[in-house]
């Protein structure tokens, strides 16, 4: 974004001033939030909090551009273009652009494959998709021992009806290297396979070998290998990789941070049944368009999303009277489901202390009966079914919702909640906890809530109130937050100016560090408090990742190590400063000096991180990335 500011014409708003507060505006515990940062600290605070971490040169660029112009650009991403490199890296992930139904058709579920295999399901019209489904269905029958005159291969090392033999694509020595060679040798072979041979190669391999090569393959081949083994994994992998690539490369950094925040606020678990097919649309269509928009629109979009309806079971919630009348014999019992009603009040709007009762939860659940999914097993969209709606009168938070309102009952609930003072306070508190401090000063939260109410829930204005506050640019906020595993990994990649050609294994690294993307089971999302991410074991894991990254030992991520050699010879601490964009702490400087003085320690650090032979510049960089100060933002 900083690079684009000088070349893209922007109409700047009148410069806003940072509004200072008095020490007496809060209790004495918050006095640090009334103090000032110096100019350099303000710039670093903006880069640390409003991006996924600075890249080399970002500080100089924001200094040249000016803080106000930079902040305005982040708050108005529509004014400047997105990174062409990011668009190029996202291009192979076609599921990002598909509807729910298209995703379901192109990447068939195990249930669809089994249905086709048994003769109960229709084959796709597209010839290429038809061939894929037929192969997978044949493999399903083979494993189940249902094909005539076929003895199942218990090692699962063969597919039926292969189009070509592997020997028609690779030379004998290449086939042998794929089986017994080193990882780099295998990668070179996979990289060299012509684009028009990728499909043939994928199906020519035995299934077990496909699985083993997935992590080594370049993106186009990897997606084909995954498609031939387990198609729905392609959908999940595309979404996770895209999230990482956007965080690394996007010129709209604040927007990406807010997409992450609001998805977490309206959390949906990826691995609950059909949600793995719906989640891409959920983030793209329900979350992303509204992060700078109106809170009511965001709330409505999530309420109507098939992902949320499925995750919290509201798609099956019906009025008990209708269930008793219409339920077929021996069918599963359906009735009123309170899951969405409870989480809507507790997590999405009012907060746990927002003044609602169990009777409010029940009334809200009744209002949303009939909000369901059309053809949920075939990638359907939102549908309102009036036949299973509770048409009686409801009372929500003391407000009467008359009988006979139909779908309007749910819409009325959303209106009440979106404009409620408790919602304004809870949403403002959560944003301040994410961007300012775990315990943000009440003066700031109250001003944000006031903006929320006066603007009718304008989220951009709420963010402006926060960002242009004295509390945000204060010692109380400066370096007060600990990075989540996702933030740590992405910030390390950005700090080293690494080139990410594949984020597949970065996604695995984030999972190992404790934050598997889109896989928080509970609806409250991942925690945003420091204490939840700090432990001796987690910090050691972060250090080992940092050392592996700095040694160029994370496949799909490439660092230019040559420049580090000269800098580290001249002054090891200069390399540390270039990565941290500040002087290393006394603790970090001592750790680097201890490493430089001990060859055994150098070897131990490299071995623990599985980073290969130790390299001094990489060890300096790794210790810097794994340092306590780098874990903070």
Image (tube, rainbow, N blue to C red):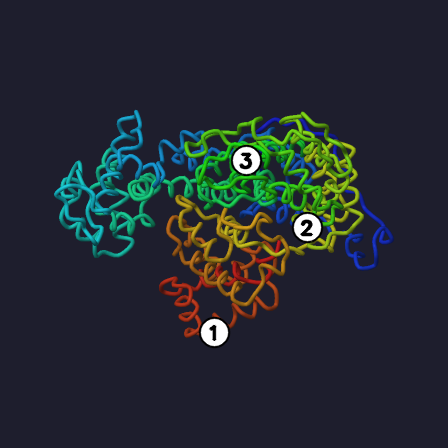
Residue 457 screen position, x and y as percent: 71, 34
- Mark 3 residue element: helix
Q: Residues within 10 Å of mark 1 (few under 14, many from 20)?
A: few
Provide the residue designation for mark 2.
433
* Residue 218, quarter of the rendered image: top left
88 or 42, nearer to the observer: 88
Residue 91 appears in the picture as rendered: no
| The N terminus - image quarter | top right
- In terms of sequence position, does the residue under pointer 3 or pointer 2 come before the other? 3
Residue at x-position 71% and y-position 41%: 360
Please identify, in this view, whether the residue under mark 3 or under mark 2 is nearer the observer.
3
User: Do labels 3 and 1 touch, CB within 8 Å?
Assistant: no
Mark 3–mark 2 Cα distance, whole angstroms, equals: 43 Å
Provide the residue designation for mark 1.
597
Provide the residue designation for mark 3.
323
- Mark 1 residue element: helix
Mark 3–mark 1 Cα distance, whole angstroms, equals: 75 Å
Judge from the rendering whether residue 62 lies leftward or rightward of residue 111; answer left or right.
right
Residue at x-position 17% and y-position 53%: 176
Residue at x-position 46% and y-position 59%: 545
Asked if 436 appears above or below 83 in the picture, the reply is below
* Residue 290, quarter of the rendered image: top right
- In terms of sequence position, does the residue under pointer 2 or pointer 1 come before the other? 2
- Mark 2 residue element: helix
Please identify, in this view, whether the residue under mark 3 or under mark 1 is nearer the observer.
3
Residue 450 screen position, x and y as percent: 79, 39
Asked if 5 appears above or below 433 in the picture, the reply is above
- In terms of sequence position, does the residue under pointer 3 or pointer 1 come before the other? 3
């Amino acid at each position: 974004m900083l690079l684009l500011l000088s070349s893209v014409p922007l109409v700047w708003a009148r410069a806003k001033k940072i509004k200072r507060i008095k020490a007496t505006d809060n209790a004495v515990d918050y006095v640090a939030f009334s103090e000032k940062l110096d100019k350099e600290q303000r710039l670093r605070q903006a880069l640390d909090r409003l991006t996924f971490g600075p890249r080399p040169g970002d500080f100089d660029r924001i200094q040249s551009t000016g803080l106000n112009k930079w902040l305005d650009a982040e708050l108005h991403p529509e004014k400047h273009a997105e990174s062409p490199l990011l668009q190029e890296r996202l291009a192979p992930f076609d599921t990002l652009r598909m509807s729910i139904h298209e995703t379901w058709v192109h990447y068939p579920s195990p249930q669809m494959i089994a249905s086709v295999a048994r003769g109960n399901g229709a084959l796709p019209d597209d010839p290429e998709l038809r061939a894929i489904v037929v192969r997978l269905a044949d493999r399903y029958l083979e494993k189940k021992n249902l094909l005539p005159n076929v003895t199942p291969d218990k090692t699962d090392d063969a597919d039926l009806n292969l189009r070509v033999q592997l020997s028609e694509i690779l030379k004998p020595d290449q086939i042998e290297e794929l089986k017994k060679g080193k990882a780099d040798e295998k990668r070179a072979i996979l990289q060299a396979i012509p684009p028009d041979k990728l499909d043939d190669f994928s199906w020519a391999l035995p299934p077990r070998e496909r699985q083993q090569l997935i992590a080594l393959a370049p993106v186009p081949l990897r997606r084909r290998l995954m498609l031939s083994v387990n198609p729905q994994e392609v959908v999940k992998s595309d979404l996770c990789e895209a999230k990482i690539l956007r965080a690394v490369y996007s010129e709209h950094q604040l927007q990406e941070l807010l997409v992450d925040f609001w998805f977490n606020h309206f959390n949906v678990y990826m691995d609950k049944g059909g949600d793995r097919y719906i989640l891409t649309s959920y983030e793209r269509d329900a979350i992303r368009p509204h992060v700078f928009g109106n809170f009511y629109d965001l709330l409505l979009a999530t309420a109507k999303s098939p992902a949320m309806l499925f995750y919290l079971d509201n798609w099956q919630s019906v009025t008990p009277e209708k269930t008793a009348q219409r339920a077929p014999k021996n069918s599963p019992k359906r009735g009123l489901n309170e899951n969405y009603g409870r989480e809507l009040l507790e997590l999405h709007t009012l907060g746990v202390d927002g003044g609602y009762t169990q009777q409010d939860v029940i009334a809200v659940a009744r209002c949303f009966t009939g909000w369901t999914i059309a053809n949920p097993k075939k990638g359907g969209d939102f549908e309102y079914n009036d036949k299973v709606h509770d048409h009686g009168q409801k009372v929500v938070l003391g407000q009467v919702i008359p009988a006979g309102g139909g779908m309007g009952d749910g819409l009325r609930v959303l209106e009440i909640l979106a404009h409620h003072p408790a919602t304004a306070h809870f949403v403002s508190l959560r944003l301040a906890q994410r961007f300012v401090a775990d315990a943000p000063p009440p003066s700031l939260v109250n001003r944000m809530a006031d903006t929320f109410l006066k603007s009718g829930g304008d989220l951009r204005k709420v963010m402006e109130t926060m960002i242009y506050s004295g509390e945000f640019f204060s010692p109380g906020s400066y370096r007060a937050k600990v990075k989540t595993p996702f933030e740590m990994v992405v910030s390390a990649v950005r700090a080293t100016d690494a080139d990410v050609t594949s984020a597949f294994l970065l996604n695995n690294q984030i999972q190992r560090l404790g934050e598997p993307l889109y896989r928080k089971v509970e609806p409250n999302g991942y925690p945003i408090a420091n204490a939840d991410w700090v432990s001796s074991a987690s910090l050691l894991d972060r250090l080992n990742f940092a050392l592996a990254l700095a040694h160029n030992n994370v496949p799909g991520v490439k660092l230019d190590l040559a420049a580090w050699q000269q800098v580290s010879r001249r002054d090891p601490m200069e390399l540390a400063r270039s990565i941290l964009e500040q002087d290393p702490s006394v603790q970090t400087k001592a750790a680097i000096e201890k490493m430089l003085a001990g060859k055994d320690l150098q070897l131990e650090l490299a071995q623990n991180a599985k980073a290969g032979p130790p390299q001094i510049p990489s060890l300096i960089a790794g210790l810097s990335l794994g340092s306590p100060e780098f874990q903070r933002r």
